[in-house]
Image (spheres, helix red, strand yellow):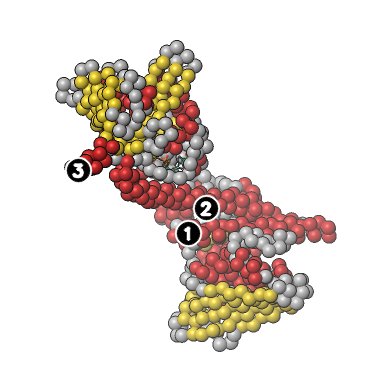
Amino acid sequence: MIKLSKKVALVGSFGVGKTSLFRRFIDNEFSTDYKSTLGVQIQKKVITMDNGIELSMILWDTEGHENISEGRSSYLIGSHAFVYVFDITRIDTYKEINTQIEFLKNHFPNAVIKIVGNKLDAVSKKKAIETLKEYSVQYDYLTSAKTGDYVEELFADIAVDVTN
Amino acid sequence: MGDENQKKFYKKVQLVTVNELGKIIYSDANLFSWNVNDSIYEAHPFFSIIESLKEAVSAQENEFTFPCVHLKEGKEASRICDVTFTVSYGEINIVIFDYTQAYLDLNKISQERNESIIKAQELEFTNRLLIEKENFKNDFIASINHELTTPLTSVKGFIELLEKTNLDYEQEELVKIIKTESDHLQNIFGDMFDISRIESGGFKLEEETFNLKELFSTIVNSNKGPIEKQALNFKTEIDNKLNAELIGDKTRLYQIISNLISNALKYTDEGFIKFSINRLSGKSSKQQIAIVVEDSGIGISEEDKAAIFESFSQLNPNIKGSGLGLNIVRSLVSLMEGEILLESKVGVGSKFTVVLSLKNASGEETEEVKHHYELPKGKKYRILVVENQLNTQYLLLKILLAQGSFFVDAVSSAEAAIKAIENREYKLIISDIKLDELTGFQLAQRIRNQYGDVAIKNIPILGISALRAPNMTNKAIAAGMDAFLSKPFSEKQLLQKVNRLIYLANHK
Ligand SMILES: Nc1nc2c(ncn2[C@@H]2O[C@H](COP(=O)(O)OP(=O)(O)OP(=O)(O)O)[C@@H](O)[C@H]2O)c(=O)[nH]1
Ligand SMILES: [Mg+2]
């Protein structure tokens, strides 16, 4: 069996739900309390993929910053994938998302990048899509860490992309 | 540094050395009890970063620091550490500083800051959604109202025509019911539209001179029938000290009082309904009046008093009505900067008092002379009807032709209307506002501006529409029309306007 280890970093503004997605994916837990993440916490989740690969995903849940370049740059080193999370219910977390994504693309040209709008449960999907369109946000997934919607799908997609 | 201090300091730092395969070759175990010969990769997933560091290392850079990393061993609480890796040939030195307490202190600040920003941003979005929802609701009501009013106009018109045919007793009774029901429906639509406009702020009160005593009589006359039909005693009273010439929104005042009276009528089975207007106080410029509607009906309990003015509240679901009437009353009264008081006792009756401060009209009379415009008998006038709703067009034709004093042509677009007026002389144009290409307003503007021939340029134009937008009359006048009639209208209302416009044009 092929064993691989890949680093996946969760980035984005504070309070968007990075820790919540991380906990939903790893332990299938969710809490409505907000405790802002301090620095970085790292956990591993091993998944066996359809093609037989056993993938150790090393998930880095980083503390949130409005601007990614304000964060600690060492956390980003060696990432195979970035999950850029924004909060659908806070326009400020995505109105300048393109600058953030450009930054990642420039510094990590080989990394997989997934753009994720979280807290889908807090707004009607129609409204979410309309608002994101208004701000020209190109997202890959709309998730809810609260209900778990699309969280598995997101990470399964990343697993495929980082092992290709 | 004393011995004790030194010990404390060392307790906060751990030194670890690993070989290129990640095997621990030295560890002082000050913080974490990792053993020599174990793999650092098993110690914590964080250390898998070493693989990337080995790739990133260069002649210029072989030291990498990771501040504020949560490290954990077994069931123990996380330590928050700064970790420095020095990558040299064959081995990697790791220095781990435990700064847990210092970091936790820092976190309190960022936590608070983040929370308050998040709250503000969420609120911004919520407001945005609320505004959108509100706009949608109001647009929806306005457009649905238009959609509903148009067919209702036809229905009501045809009922009037039907009434004039030879009906037997049973049919006549059935027609009466249909008529009452469609009036009721019309009232509900009106209420619905008023509320949505008041709530959205798109509602403006008119300022016009009116005579309060006349308004009083009008209301008394129109309510007398229905009240006495229910075997109730209708008591009315108006204060003689009142200065009757006032400035305000007569139509809305009428609506306030009518709603209160019809509310009283709904809840009173026996006894009386009393309507009175009193002067409370007055200066030269203003006068404070109290409008009182009292009944001997079922009364309202203390708990229900607050709910009674809310939209859609209907104390007795068996009673017919939209339940919107009192909500409109309250909103209109507050727009007029007045007050509404309710006294009531279950089983005894209710008393609504509206206190308003109204401006006195200055000396000169601006009162419109009530006039009955009668057209000379035996003469026929040609009217052009511009209406794209075929039912309404047919209805207008039937009403007008039945008078015997009009020739009527009907077209369904402004373009066709222009052709028609260029070929024939008309004494009046009745035009719908919402036509397909050019609107009725645009048609009026063309007629007024593009023709030198006074026979065309000055044709009186009556606008009609089911659009319940504010100030339609003003908009119609601004477009060059002479009068405006909102749908649904009665045969009488239509003929009054038609006769007046033709009469005035002939008596210039
Ligand atoms: N309704 C809803 N709330 C969510 C969702 N995800 C997260 N939250 C809430 O949003 C708040 C912030 O979530 P976190 O996961 O701590 O956000 P974060 O991105 O890790 O924040 P930082 O660590 O400060 O960068 C918490 O109160 C969560 O309960 C979601 O999908 N739906
Ligand atoms: Mg977090």
Residue type beneath disc 2: Asn
Residue closer to the observer: B501 or A146: A146
Q: x%, y% of residue A118? A: 44, 37
Q: CA distance from mark 2 to mark 3?
A: 77 Å
Quarter of the figure with residue B319:
bottom right
Q: Which mark is residue B138?
A: 2
**Residue sitting at the far bottom:** B241
Q: Earlier in the sequence, mark 3 or mark 1?
A: 3
Q: CA distance from mark 1 to mark 2?
A: 10 Å
Residue at 67% of width from left, 68% of height from top?
Answer: B263
Residue at 18% of width from left, 25% of height from top?
Answer: B61
| Mark 1 vs 2: CB contact within 8 A | yes
Residue type beneath disc 1: Gly
Q: x%, y% of residue B287? A: 50, 82
According to the picture, the residue beneath numbered tag 1 turns out to be: B202
User: Viewer-nearest of labels 3 and 1?
Assistant: 3
- Can you say which quadrant of the picture contains the N terminus of chain A? top left
Q: Which mark is residue A72?
A: none
- Can you say which quadrant of the picture contains the C terminus of chain A? top left
Q: Quadrant of ligand 2?
A: top left
